[in-house]
Image (cartoon, grey):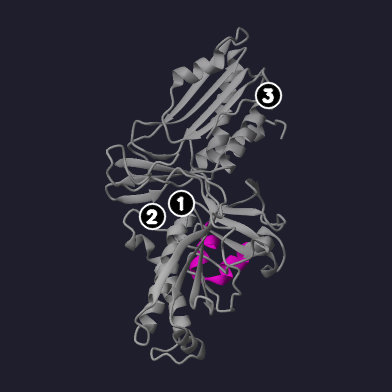
Amino acid sequence: MNELTHLDARGQAHMVDVGQKEITARTAVASAAIRMQPQTLARIMAGEHPKGDVLATARIAGIMAAKRTADLIPLCHPLMLSKVAVELTPDEALPGIRIEATCRLAGRTGVEMEALTAASVAALTLYDMCKAVDKRMIIDDIKVLEKTGGKSGDWRPFEDQSPATEVLSVAQSVSQSASTVPADVGTSVHVRFFAELREQLQMEACDVPLEALSEPTVAALLNWLVAQASERAALQQQPQLLMAVNQEMVKPMHPLQVGDEVAFFPPVTGG
Amino acid sequence: MSDELCPDNVCPRYVRVQPAPFSVESEMQRLTQGRSDIGATVTFVGYVRDFNERPDVLALTLEHYPAMTEKALHQIIDEAISRWSLNGISVIHRVGKMTPGDPIVLVLVASAHRQAAFEACNFLMDYLKTRAPFWKKEHTASGDYWVSARDSDTQAADRWHAAGAPS
């Protein structure tokens, strides 16, 4: 159970084959903090730093870093993230900035390394942005706050200890080509793509808010997906596109409900 | 990935989707052990060919839609049980990477009389090939491609509709 999965029987490092793991919706949240002189924090808040908007820069750095995790951590799988969000919260009690990074995807492996990387690089960027005025900053408190989805289920190892900080609305999310809008699971349908279609769209899965559709049907969902990005024309060029709702094949006019899992795929070729 | 035994002890069913190879012998034994009402078994094993859409297939990768695959296989088995009098069914389908000569799929059907087992096995494969969410990608020296669905498979499955069965 607690063996190191990145080591093989001879103790040598190897990349774990996750090809047979189930694809599930996975989220990880990681934190970091950077402590600084009170006046350094005050200058950040006042927007007086010589290098410009410190928080916005660190936030973008964190988002970009999450996308590069597999390049930095040797045995980490490259992942198709569907969402990365980095929140920066000034905390006068530290004094400094608290960082919280959230990564999400539908895939076979967890995203905590991406969340940790985002939080860490956001912290490093804050350091870089402020080092001209403060030489004694300390980066610490880098940890995984929460992980959901996957074999091990959901866990929040530090739940009792996380500081109740008021989050300023500096949160921002990105959607890569791998995703559509970041959506609240409570109002969305989960959409999955398989085989050639997944490769053509370069997308395994996404969440689509039901209210974005002209009507709650699979056909309307398909139209919406194609309208979002021109490269998704593949969805309509597939001559015999098959569709399933909650793992049952359906016709295009099949109605959709919040929480449904919708899948699009080409004709099957098993056996 | 796990065995599922139908509560119906007249026609037990075993459905598995797995990367590992299977043993026809042990699956057959599982189906027939302790049974004296079985008069016939029919075994179908599908293998990876070294020629298909291109003549030099080096390997094949099978992708599937977990959760839906098992559901679809059970529905196909339900349909077979509603059409023929059967005493047991095993369907094992491999996924992941395989090379020519590797077995991909096993369908085992047991019945009191041979005709039901022959027909049900044929039916199960025809329906599996057109209704279960598996996709093959072939790897050749000149590149990889997704295998196209064949009209002949669709026609093979359609003839069971024409046979006028409950559905």
* Chain ID at mark 3: B
Give a yes or no on whether discs 3 and 1 share a subunit.
no
Q: Which residues are magenta?
A: A222-238
Q: Amino acid at mark 3?
A: Pro
Whether residue A246 can be seen here: yes
- Asked which secondary structure carries label 3, the reply is loop
**Nearer to the camera, A225 or A57:** A57
Q: At 37% across and 55% down in the image, what residue appears?
A: A76
To which residue does mark 3 refer? B7
- Compute the Cα span from label 2 to label 3: 41 Å
The answer to whether dots 2 and 3 both sit on one chain is: no
> How far separated are the C-alphas under marks 3 and 1?
35 Å
User: Which residue occupies the foreground of this view, B82 or A2?
Assistant: A2
Q: Position of residue A167 (x, y in %)?
A: 59, 75
Which residue type does callout 1 highlight?
Thr
Point 31% across, 51% down: residue: B143
Q: Nearer the viewer, mark 3 or mark 1?
A: 1
Residue hosting label 1: A109
For marks 2 and 3, give the one nearer the viewer: 2
Say which mark, if any, is on residue A201. Answer: none
